[in-house]
Image (cartoon, rainbow, N blue to C red):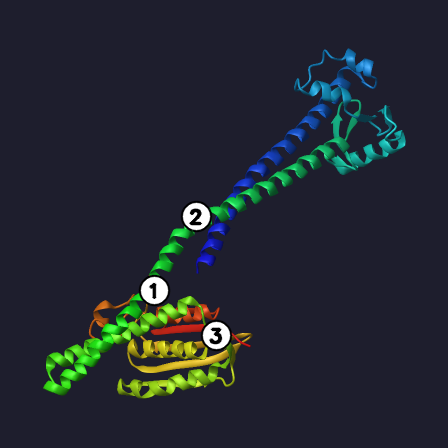
């Protein structure tokens, strides 16, 4: 139980922190990417400004002479000087007018073909074969400017690499801290739960002796003074106390999970537990329908506890039935044995369904105080048994029926 709670706490913390870290690093990455893209675009635009005013700045000394042309951003000045920028100018007839190519990385023919592809694309700017390009149209020419993206891509890959590295490291640290935090949160709850289990077990053992003594003394008194209303009350309440102690002991035993599991015929167990309850149900005008019990469904379990589980569910259905039939079924669904117990009854509010399996919880206190031996421990014991067998138990309401369903793995 607490292991699942720890997993849920860790999963919740990790989910929240993953979103925060991913959002933070995502913003850093995309803002940096956008800033580098804008920087390259500014340099391409500055090149077109220089070309429009002074012609092609193809030599470093010529670029130095054009320093009087203000850059779009001061910090772009040095980057502009070292950037690998090429251009091709076309006249009005789409013939090459001028080429600015001071690098051996690409030939003039390749640059011209690339420029024509850029023009054919219909877009004034974009990416093409590892280059950023910008097309500037004037009255007498079309200027296609290219910038090598290799440095840009290298920077982007480096940024992405370190973003992922630091993201993974951050998540690993968060995972370690969340595990520590989950243990700190669960530890006092687990300690209290274990203390409660010890109390139930110890109280059950300690109460057995006085209950036995009271029962013996009552029998002796009855032999000496005969039947007496006060003596009957003592015997009745003592029997109720004895049943409560047995339930407490059963609950403590199932919660220890110290049970021997073996291959058992669950179908045989279910049929065997139904038969003794038929007469009890008949006295209350209730019929138990168990035609839908499939034969030879085997599970890995403890026959004694599984018998107790079925007994609890049938007893609960009879106790809370509003009449009519109790429908029982046991089917094999893939690798699961599914036991269903259905009775007519009042619908259970959604917020009360999980509480049904809590210790000493009774949905209708007024009804349960009218006598009987129901203390709100039966379904809690049933849940503990199902948990010890690595199964699942649930309750649902539909069309005036209360449906309990138990799912156990078959073998």
Residue drawn at x 69%, y 14% as measured from the top left: 70
Instruction: Estimate the spatial distance between the alpha carbons at disc 1 and disc 2, rounded to whole Å.
Output: 24 Å
Where's residue 58, x and y in %?
83, 19
Residue drawn at x 44%, y 81% as measured from the top left: 329
Where's residue 200, x and y in %?
32, 65
Residue drawn at x 73%, y 34% as measured from the top left: 154
Residue with the mark numbered 2:
184
Residue with the mark numbered 3:
260
Instruction: Estimate the spatial distance between the alpha carbons at disc 3 and disc 1, rounded to whole Å.
Output: 25 Å
Q: Quadrant of the N terminus?
A: bottom left
In terms of image quadrants, where is residue 310? bottom left
Please say if 385 is above or below 270. Answer: above
Where disc 3 sits, the SS reads loop
Where disc 1 sits, the SS reads loop
In terms of image quadrants, where is residue 350? bottom left
Please say if 176 is above or below 389. Answer: above
């Amino acid at each position: 139980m607490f292991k699942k709670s720890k997993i849920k706490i860790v999963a919740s913390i990790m989910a929240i922190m993953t979103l925060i870290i991913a959002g933070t690093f995502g913003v850093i990455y995309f803002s940096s990417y956008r800033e580098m893209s804008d920087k390259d675009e500014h340099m391409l635009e500055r090149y077109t400004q220089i070309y429009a005013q002074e012609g092609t700045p193809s030599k470093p000394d010529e670029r130095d002479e054009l320093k009087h042309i203000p850059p779009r951003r001061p910090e772009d000045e040095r980057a502009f000087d070292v950037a690998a920028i090429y251009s091709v100018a076309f006249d009005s007839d789409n013939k090459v007018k001028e080429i600015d190519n001071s690098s051996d990385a690409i030939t003039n023919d390749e640059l011209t073909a690339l420029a024509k592809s850029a023009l054919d694309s219909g877009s004034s700017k974009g990416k093409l074969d590892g280059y950023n390009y910008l097309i500037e149209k004037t009255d007498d020419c079309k200027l296609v400017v290219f910038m090598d993206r290799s440095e840009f891509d290298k920077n982007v890959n480096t940024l992405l690499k370190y973003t992922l590295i630091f993201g993974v490291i951050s998540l690993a640290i968060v995972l370690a801290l969340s595990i520590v935090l989950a243990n700190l949160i669960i530890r006092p709850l687990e300690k209290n739960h274990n203390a409660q289990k010890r109390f139930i077990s110890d109280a059950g053992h300690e109460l057995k002796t006085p209950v036995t003594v009271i029962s013996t003394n009552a029998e002796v008194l009855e032999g000496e003074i005969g039947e007496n209303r006060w003596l009957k009350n003592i015997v009745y309440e003592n029997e109720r106390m004895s049943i409560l102690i047995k339930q407490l002991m059963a609950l403590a035993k199932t919660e220890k999970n110290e049970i021997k599991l073996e291959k058992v015929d669950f179908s045989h167990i279910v049929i065997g537990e139904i038969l003794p309850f038929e007469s009890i149900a008949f006295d209350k005008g209730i019929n138990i329908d168990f035609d839908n019990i499939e034969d030879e469904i085997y599970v890995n379990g403890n026959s004694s506890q599984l018998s107790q589980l079925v007994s609890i569910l049938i007893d609960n259905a009879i106790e809370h039935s509003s009449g009519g039939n109790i429908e029982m079924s046991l089917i094999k669904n893939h690798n699961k044995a599914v036991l269903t117990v259905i009775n007519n009854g009042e619908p259970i509010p959604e917020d009360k369904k999980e509480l049904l399996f809590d210790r000493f919880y009774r949905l209708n206190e007024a009804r349960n105080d009218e006598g009987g031996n129901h203390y709100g421990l039966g379904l809690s014991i049933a849940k503990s048994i199902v948990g010890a067998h690595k199964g699942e138990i649930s309750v649902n309401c539909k069309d005036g029926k209360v449906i309990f369903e138990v799912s156990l793995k078959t073998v």
